[in-house]
Image: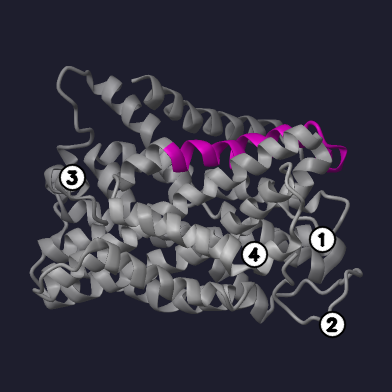
């Protein structure tokens, strides 16, 4: 297991110190950084296109969905008997070998498609800036994607501690820029228009059918937009390494502050974007397969948005790519070591067998340029729902170490949200 962020001299013994420290702030910002990326930058496009009322309803659900689900997954990782075990090891311990393999498989495929989405989004953002803001001829997608992804892989190779520190450092300019951009768009708000467009009714459907259908497909997008499952395992194992029996309390403290920050920040940004555009603008952004920031840069012919928006999008996607890399790599190693092949511990540091393989797949998908929102709706949200929502609730009523955390109303809420998100996958496959 990669050594957690912190001093190498720290032991696994009980640590009663639970006051807020600098390293807690680093983790809080890293959780924020992992979650706030491509999902949030595409959230206004889908949420706004459905109308204002679906967006208001989803906004009320955002915090309980995010906090309860991620805290449940954190408690699941902490429930393992071996302090060094990550989420894949804990799943095997609690559910047995076969179920452990299944959970490891789902864990990897709930994260790696997200990393592929970020690869596409990163390349599209750079291409849009190069053509629309710089006025230059587009470079071949393969060249652009290769340069960008290799640059991020250079950071990855330094280690987990560096990834966490780089991500937390990138959050500061991102938050400041996002607030400034959201505030800058306030004069463009069209409240009168949106009061008349509470729900964008689709042809051939009633008002309520359209509303329910919109909410059904918005839930997996919200799940993905605030999702930081990829870094939860590394986060939980680090806190147990540093705080022992107080790890659960410390994790809850950090998660709570991180979730309040991300929900407040994202909702302000999303509402500012939606109120500044029309449903037709948002549908056009979806067709162009670019983030809301790239669309704003092309829509408003002002130097601040034109140049700042793509930069903010680039930072957001880059830091989320780094955060999801940790989880994808952990899942890939877990699948390798649970396969019929001989476990190879060297995979954790072997660039040729792990990193190059992930790099090449990400580069290929970024070059092909599939629909980002389609991938989020059909892969990112539903599969993540199984790991983030369904599994922790199931474990809470199956694993004795987790029984003390049972809360039936909350567990029902999280379970239902997870089932709704997963059901969109079934619908997409059938229709």
The residue depicted at 79 percent of the width and 56 percent of the height is 85
Q: Gap between marks 4 and 1, in whole Å? A: 20 Å
Q: Gap between marks 2 and 1, in whole Å? A: 15 Å
Instruction: Name the image quarter holding residue 414.
Output: top right
Q: Gap between marks 1 and 3, in whole Å? A: 46 Å
The residue depicted at 73 percent of the width and 47 percent of the height is 341
Mark 3, residues whose alpha carbon is within 10 Å: few (<14), some, or many (≥20)? few
Can you tell which of label 3 and label 4 is closer to the viewer? 3
Which one is in front, 310 or 60? 310
Q: Earlier in the sequence, mark 2 or mark 1?
A: 2
Which one is in front, 101 or 180? 101
Q: Gap between marks 3 and 4, in whole Å? A: 38 Å
Q: Is residue 40 visible?
A: no
Is 143 on the left-hand or right-hand side of 172?
left
Is 79 on the left-hand or right-hand side of 356?
right
Residue 24: x and y, percent? 66, 73
| Helix, strand or loop: magenta stretch | helix
Q: Earlier in the sequence, mark 3 or mark 2?
A: 2
Residue identifier under label 2: 9
Mark 2, residues whose alpha carbon is within 10 Å: few (<14), some, or many (≥20)? few
Is 330 on the left-hand or right-hand side of 270?
right
Residue identifier under label 3: 287
Residue identifier under label 4: 254
Magenta residues, start to end: 379-404
Residue identifier under label 1: 84
Q: Is residue 243 visible?
A: yes
Q: Earlier in the sequence, mark 4 or mark 2?
A: 2
Q: Is residue 377 magenta?
A: no
| For the residues bearing labels 4 and 2, Cβ distance under 8 angstroms | no
């Amino acid at each position: 297991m990669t050594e957690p962020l912190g001093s190498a001299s720290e032991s696994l013994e009980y640590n009663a110190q639970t006051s807020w420290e600098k390293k807690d702030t680093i983790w809080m910002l890293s959780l924020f950084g992992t979650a706030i990326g491509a999902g949030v930058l595409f959230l206004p496009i889908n949420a706004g296109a459905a109308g204002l009322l679906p967006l208001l309803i989803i906004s009320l659900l955002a915090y309980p969905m995010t906090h309860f689900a991620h805290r449940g997954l954190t408690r699941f990782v902490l429930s393992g008997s071996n302090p060094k075990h990550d989420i894949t090891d804990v799943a095997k311990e609690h559910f047995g070998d076969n179920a452990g393999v299944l959970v490891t498989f789902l864990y990897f495929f709930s994260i790696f498609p997200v990393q592929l989405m970020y690869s596409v989004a990163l390349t599209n953002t750079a291409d849009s800036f190069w053509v629309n803001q710089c006025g230059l001829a587009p470079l071949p997608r393969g060249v652009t994607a290769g340069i960008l992804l290799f640059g991020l892989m250079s950071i990855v190779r330094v280690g987990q501690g560096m990834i966490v520190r780089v991500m937390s450092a990138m959050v500061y300019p991102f938050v400041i820029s996002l607030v400034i951009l959201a505030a800058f768009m306030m004069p463009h708000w069209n409240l009168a228009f949106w009061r008349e467009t509470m729900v964008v009714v689709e042809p051939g459907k009633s008002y309520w059918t359209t509303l329910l259908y919109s909410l059904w497909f918005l839930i997996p997008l919200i799940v993905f937009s605030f999702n930081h499952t990829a870094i939860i395992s590394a986060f939980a194992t680090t806190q147990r390494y540093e705080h022992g029996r107080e790890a659960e309390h410390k994790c809850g403290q950090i998660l709570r502050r991180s979730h309040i920050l991300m929900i407040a920040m994202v909702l302000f940004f999303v509402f500012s974007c939606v109120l500044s555009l029309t449903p037709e603008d948002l549908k056009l952004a979806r067709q162009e397969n670019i983030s809301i920031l790239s669309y704003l840069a092309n829509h408003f012919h002002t130097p601040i948005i034109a140049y700042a928006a793509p930069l903010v999008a680039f930072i957001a996607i880059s830091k989320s790519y780094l955060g999801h890399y940790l989880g994808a790599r952990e899942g890939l190693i877990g699948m390798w070591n649970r396969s019929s092949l001989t476990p190879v511990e060297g995979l954790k540091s072997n660039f040729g067998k792990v990193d190059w393989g992930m790099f090449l797949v990400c580069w290929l998908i970024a070059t092909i340029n599939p629909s980002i929102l389609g991938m989020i709706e059909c892969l990112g949200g539903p599969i993540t729902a199984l790991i983030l929502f369904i599994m922790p609730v199931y474990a809470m009523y199956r694993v004795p170490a987790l029984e003390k955390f049972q809360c039936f109303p909350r567990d029902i809420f999280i379970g239902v949200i997870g089932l709704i998100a997963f059901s969109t996958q079934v619908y997409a496959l059938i229709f």
